[in-house]
Image (cartoon, rainbow, N blue to C red):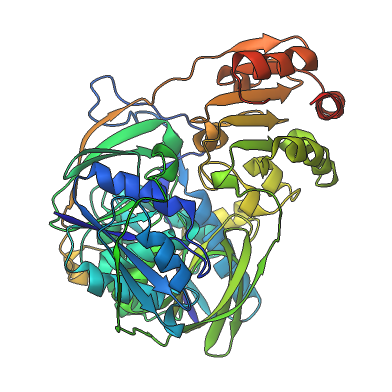
């Protein structure tokens, strides 16, 4: 069974991103970039499926500028067998990413596509579900457990108040949540090996997809700042403040 | 202009998130209908019809929609939504699951988690864990939108008298099925709807110590949450997570215990009306957003707080 994993290059988790002074966009100059944390969990899950003998090949795909090859190499260092970059400008919308991934799905015919549930830059939480609709595949979003069983996959999902399990016909889409697994670190020998793995580059035209834009970012601005309040000396003062000043408890 | 609001419900009751979404739809200035997709969901339809400002409630009551499987529900919404300018749903885990499918079926973008309606085609939404607010303009004729419910006060649940119309459309994609669920039964209010939330972080040290929050939550009628660090460490389940990738809450009172205040956590709670932080590290970033900060060992402060409330 072939598994396709989508990875996205995003600002590192620890960076506090700010709006540019002119409000045109966020300031990403000299900011550390990394693989999106949820995509890392997706790669780990695919590699574990291969180690368990369920998957035969793991292909890492990323949509973006040439620099995203770095994240594809990271995925290959973690165990993906080969990589595909779909070359576009930065900031392509989720709907277009989903169409491009659909193009890759048509070419590669994977039985399972694993993506992160959301990227920590746009916070959209859309691409996996959109790909599901475009490819007419079932989806198991926000997954905390994935069990392949013959021509079906059972996905346990994080829902309000607990967990839900669904059974999906293969081929299917899975998007990862936090507790699905704990990704490994890439070893130095594997990082070296990853440099020699196959990485194909496609253009949107190769996949028959036209890159369109549905949304325009008019401006970005910092959120309303919360002012730091006061420190209270002890529990008694805290209760007094909450009762008599903030009036939020009685 | 017309707006279709997708009801959040569990077949038995209409969830409050729907009311916040109706309020957002009102800000769009269009006529509002509500779609209820479920099975044996008549009582939900009646509750939806009572919501102030709603014209019509459309009910698709069929076994195919019982668990609101995304593959089936998205086909229904795309079909029904064809006649509307806006299709709007709360940004709950349930609606986040199927709304992007609806958008893709209609070949339009989705605008996720809006916090403000600027005009008919322009919206604000937080990005980068809420560190930045983006204003986005859509060029799509039809808009698929999810609403960050904490940004809108609930529309009145009573006072409306919408007509209820049954839909015959049955869409069963036949590619997925419901197997089961494990939903924790709790007497506490839901995290996203509670007036008071008390959350624990890595400082709680283990899952057992979360019991220290129970007594206080009981006295305040609070829901209990957690930081991602506490979830990552395996102290508590993920559905308790407050933050960028968990739940977004904005209660009247938020008490952060043993939480350092990573930006990803702040993203989920900084719109709370009053924030209390209890942390023994006086330099913890959480104090920068807290209205009241108590520098103390939580293992001393929590029992004292519980006793004195």
> Taking B83 as reference, is A170 left or right?
right
Locate residue B68: give its quadrant: bottom left
Res. A104 visible in picture? no
Q: Residue at x 38, y 26 (%)?
A: A223
Q: How many marks?
A: 0
Left or right: residue A146 versus residue B43 is right
Q: Is residue A185 above or below residue B224?
A: below
Residue at the spot 38% in from the left edge and 68% down from the top edge: B36
Q: With respect to residue A249, does A185 lie above or below?
A: below
Q: Nearer the viewer, residue A107 or A133?
A: A133
Residue B100 screen position, x and y as percent: 34, 62
Between residues B218 and A149, which one lies in front from this camera angle?
B218
Q: Is residue B171 visible?
A: yes
Left or right: B256 as drawn, with respect to A122: right
Residue B125, x across and y down, in percent: 33, 40
Q: Quadrant of the C terminus of chain B?
A: top right
Q: Nearer the viewer, residue A127 or B36?
A: B36
Which x, y percent locates residue B203?
76, 33
Residue at the image point whose x is 29% and y is 24% from the top: A20
Quadrant of the frame with the N terminus of chain B: bottom left
Q: Quadrant of residue A218?
A: top left
């Amino acid at each position: 069974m072939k598994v396709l994993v989508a990875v996205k290059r995003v600002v590192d988790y620890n960076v506090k991103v700010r709006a540019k002074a002119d409000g045109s966009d966020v300031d990403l100059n000299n900011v550390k970039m990394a693989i999106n944390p949820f995509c890392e969990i997706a790669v780990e899950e695919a590699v574990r499926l291969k180690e368990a003998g369920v998957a035969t090949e793991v292909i890492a795909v990323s949509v973006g500028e040439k620099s995203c090859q770095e994240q594809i190499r990271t995925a290959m260092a973690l165990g993906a067998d080969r990589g595909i970059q779909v070359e576009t400008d930065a900031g392509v919308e989720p709907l277009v990413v989903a169409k491009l991934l659909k193009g890759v799905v048509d070419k590669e015919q994977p039985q399972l596509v694993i993506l992160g549930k959301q990227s920590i830059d746009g916070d959209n939480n859309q691409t996996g579900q959109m790909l599901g609709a475009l490819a007419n595949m079932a989806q198991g979003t926000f997954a905390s457990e994935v069990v392949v069983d013959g021509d079906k996959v059972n996905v346990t999902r994080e829902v309000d108040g607990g967990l839900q399990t669904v059974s999906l016909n293969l081929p299917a889409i899975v998007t990862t949540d936090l507790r699905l697994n704990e990704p490994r670190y890439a070893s130095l020998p594997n990082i070296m090996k990853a440099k020699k793995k196959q990485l194909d580059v496609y253009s949107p035209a190769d996949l028959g997809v036209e890159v369109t834009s549905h949304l325009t970012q008019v401006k970005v601005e910092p959120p309303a700042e919360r002012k730091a309040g006061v420190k209270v000396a002890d529990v008694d003062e805290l209760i007094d403040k909450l009762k008599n000043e903030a009036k939020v408890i009685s | 202009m017309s707006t279709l609001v997708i009801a959040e419900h569990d077949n038995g009751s209409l969830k409050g998130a729907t009311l916040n979404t109706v309020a957002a739809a009102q800000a769009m200035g269009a006529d509002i209908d509500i779609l209820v997709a479920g099975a044996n969901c008549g009582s939900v339809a009646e509750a939806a019809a009572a919501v102030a400002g709603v014209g019509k409630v459309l009910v698709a009551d069929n076994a195919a929609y019982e668990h609101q499987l995304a593959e089936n529900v998205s086909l229904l919404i795309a079909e029904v939504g064809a006649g509307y300018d806006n299709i709007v749903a709360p940004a709950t885990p349930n609606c986040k699951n199927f709304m992007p499918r609806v958008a893709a079926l209609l070949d339009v973008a989705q605008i996720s988690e809006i916090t403000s309606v600027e005009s008919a085609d322009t919206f604000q939404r937080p990005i980068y864990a809420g560190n930045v607010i983006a204003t986005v303009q859509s060029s799509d004729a039809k808009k698929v939108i999810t609403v960050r419910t904490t940004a809108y006060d609930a529309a009145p649940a009573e006072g409306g008298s919408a007509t209820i119309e049954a839909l015959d459309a049955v869409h069963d994609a036949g590619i997925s099925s419901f197997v089961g669920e494990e939903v924790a039964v709790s007497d506490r209010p839901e995290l996203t709807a509670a007036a008071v939330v008390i959350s624990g972080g890595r400082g709680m040290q283990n899952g057992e110590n979360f019991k220290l929050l129970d007594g206080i939550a009981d006295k305040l009628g609070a829901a209990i949450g957690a930081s991602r660090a506490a979830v990552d460490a395996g102290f508590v389940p993920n559905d308790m997570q407050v933050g960028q990738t968990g739940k977004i809450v904005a209660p009247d009172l938020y008490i952060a215990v043993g939480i350092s205040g990573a930006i990803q956590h702040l993203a989920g709670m900084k719109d709370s009306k009053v924030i209390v932080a209890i942390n023994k590290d006086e330099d913890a970033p959480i104090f920068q957003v807290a209205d009241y900060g108590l520098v103390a060992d939580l293992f001393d402060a929590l029992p004292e707080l519980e006793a004195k409330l």
